[in-house]
Every structure is written in C-alpha cells, then in structure tokens.
Image (cartoon, helix red, strand yellow):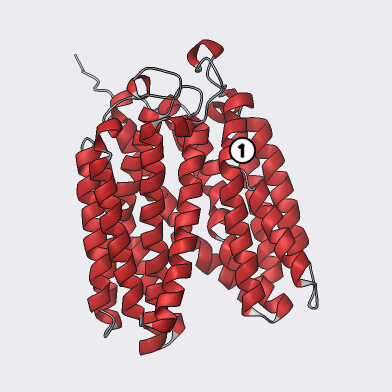
Amino acid sequence: MTSHRPSTSPLAGPGARPLLVSSLIARLPLAMFSIGILVHARQLSGSFAVAGLASSAYAIFGAISAPALGRLVDRTGQTRVLLAGSAACAGLLIGLGILGPGTSPALIVALAAAAGLTTPPLPACVRTLLPAIVSDPAQLPRLFAVESTALELTFVVGPPLVLGLGAIWSPGAALVVSGLVLLAGTIAFARQPPSRRWRPAAAAERPRRRTSALTSPAIRALVVISFGMDLVFGATEVGVTATAQHLADAAAAAPVLGLWGLGSLIGGIVATRRAGRSGPRALVLLLAALALTHGALMFCTGSLVVTAAVILLAGATIAPSASIVYAMVDRTAPAGTGTEAFSWVAAADATGAAIGAAVAGVLVQDVAPAAAFALAGAAGVLTAAIALWRGRPLHRPAAAVAVAGAPA
C-alpha cells in the first residue's frame, strides 16, 4: 500500500502559483516607475531638481493614498479598486511618457503625483490573499518568505530594465511600456480566482464600528518597524552611490547594489526553509543583524570590493525580516482591515526610503559617504530596539490585540 504524504510546498494550494506569477508581473513596473520618472523628467526639463521633485512626488502621493485604497478594498473587494487604479495610473504614466521637451515642470510633477495617487495597492492585495491560498496554515510563514524572496526579483530586474529600454528607445517610451505592463499585469492578477472571489470580512467579523488598522498596537508597531527598515535601505542606496562616485564612477554602484539584492534573495531562500522561526524574537535578532551589517559599511568606503562583500552579507537580512513583518501583519490586523494594514506597511516602506535617501544625501554632501552608512546603522539599531520594546503585542493574534473601543 502506497502512502501519500501531503505536499510541504507552501505553493501547493489551489491557484497559488498562477496568482504569485501574475502578481510579480503586475508589481514589476512598481520597481521601475521612480527611476523611470526621474530619468524622463530630467530629459524633459533639463533639471535634476525637477526630476527629483517629480520622482519624490510619485513616491509621496503613492504613500499617502495606499492606506485609503487598502481600506476601500477591505470594504468593497479587490477587483474594482485594482482595475480602476491600474487604468488611471497607466493612463497618467502614458500621458507623462509622451510629453515632449519644454513641458512645464509643474505639469510633469503634477502628472507624477497623480500617478502615485492612483497606483493600485497590489502588494497589500497579494499579501491579503496568501492565507486563503496556502495549502496548510502552518506553511503560511514560509509562503510569506517565498513571496518576499520572489518580490526581490522585481527590484533586481526592474530598474535595469527601465534604464535599458530608455537607452534603446527613449525614457518616455520606457515609461509608456511600464504603464502598459502595469495595466496588463493587474488585469491578469485581478482575473485570478482567489482575487476575483475575495470578499471583505463579513459584517459579523468586523469591529462594531468602523475603525482603522492603526487602532491595533501591533500594527502601529509594525508600521514603525517597516519605516525604520526602509530608512536604512534609502540611506544605504545613497551611501553606495556616493561611495562609487568617490572611488570610481557612479555607474559602478549598479553591480554593488545588484549584490545587495542578490544577498536578499539568498537570505529569502534560507528563510523559506526556516520559516518556523518567525516570532518577535527572530525579528529582533534579524533587525540587529540588519543594523550591524549595514552600519559596518561605514568602515568599507575605501574599497568597492570590500563594500560589495559586506553589502552581500547585509542584503541577506532583508527578505527574512520583511517576511516576518508581513506574517505578523496578517496575524495581528483587526478583522476587516487586512488590506489596509498591509497598505500602511507599504506606505511606511516608501516614506522611510524617501526620508532615508534625503537625509543621507545631505550627510554625504556635507560630511562623507560613510555618514550615510552611519545613519543606516543608527536607524537599524533604533528599529531593533523598538521591535524589542514593542514585542509583547506582536506575540498576540488579532483577536487578542486591543483596538479602540474593545477590551484587550
């Protein structure tokens, strides 16, 4: 008699692989837009200041709208929000892409801001669906690790792809293609049965009064932790670019940053095999390692080879930390606020990276490239300390987490 053991793959659930693949295609352009807007706006205006303002406007307005769109998804479902958002965002990016030289800087920035404002909440929608598609609930932490690892591919492939399209064709054409890919990928994702059939929490499962995901102490802590993590990443990216420019050429930063992404992929692969260790203690340890390795880069600015070696090690802390955060968001979000909770984390990611890059830019300009890595290390230490301090609510599932108007 042949015995059949259940699959141990977190992607063994019905529709899991097509859903993940379509989500990665849809999210690939999200890793392309900021740099694509930056390069195109620079070509249109001839000004790095206008280009930086346009790219920042896209990121900031995207962060502002993400929680509101996530809350709308929690109330109405995914399909309409995703399709309307992708159509509007793609149309705005195409409009921006076909503009010619001499366009008013105000129009460039306005279109970039509007594109950010209408960007569909794809990351939050994907992570909201993961508990429904996992074959075994015990595999959910591993599935979050798989998703985080796979998402790293978009950040490794996306920026070089949009830059390559811009060099071969034009920056504007690259932006148009990116918008079309967003639209097509989002339609494909929204047509997947898990997304199409997903419905908001039943009225009986929702809090008695409408409430924000931020009423949960655990979600607030995770948003702050995500902000701190991405502040580290924004500062590190500027530090690597400044180090490369100081030692050789700014273009030399690309392979070093590529190794950073490769390290995250490797760390994510390891995390998929050790996903059982996904509690608050594991998060604190990973954040401490993240702070130590990224901060150590301040001693490596005399050599790109040494910087590359250390950043590969630093990258290995990224995907595992992110996967634990996502699993905790799923576990601690109040009923009926899952998508909004993930959207708050996404907004914190974008805001932290933008602020980290901005502050690091000032430090690099006034001090030295090493100062950007010092900022990254300090932000990482503070983030680990917050995770340790706020560890208690992170232990508890959503039903046990106190929200406004409800007992703990």
Q: Residue at x 62, y 31 (%)?
A: 72
Residue indicated by mark 1: 69
Residue 9 visible, this angle: no
Q: Quadrant of the C terminus?
A: top left
Left or right: 64, with 310 as reference point = right
Residue 398 position within the rendered picture, expressed as x and y whole percent measured from the top left: 37, 24
Residue 263 position within the rendered picture, expressed as x and y whole percent measured from the top left: 30, 61
Q: Could you tell me the amino acid type at mark 1?
A: Leu
Left or right: 152, with 382 as reference point = right
Residue 202 position within the rendered picture, expressed as x and y whole percent measured from the top left: 54, 14
118 shown above or below 195: below
Residue 58 position within the rendered picture, expressed as x and y whole percent measured from the top left: 62, 58
Secondary structure of the residue carrying numbered label 1: helix
Q: Residue at x 48, y 14 (%)?
A: 205
- Relative depth, front residue between 136 and 275: 275
Left or right: 197, with 356 as reference point = right
Q: Residue at x 37, y 41 (%)?
A: 222
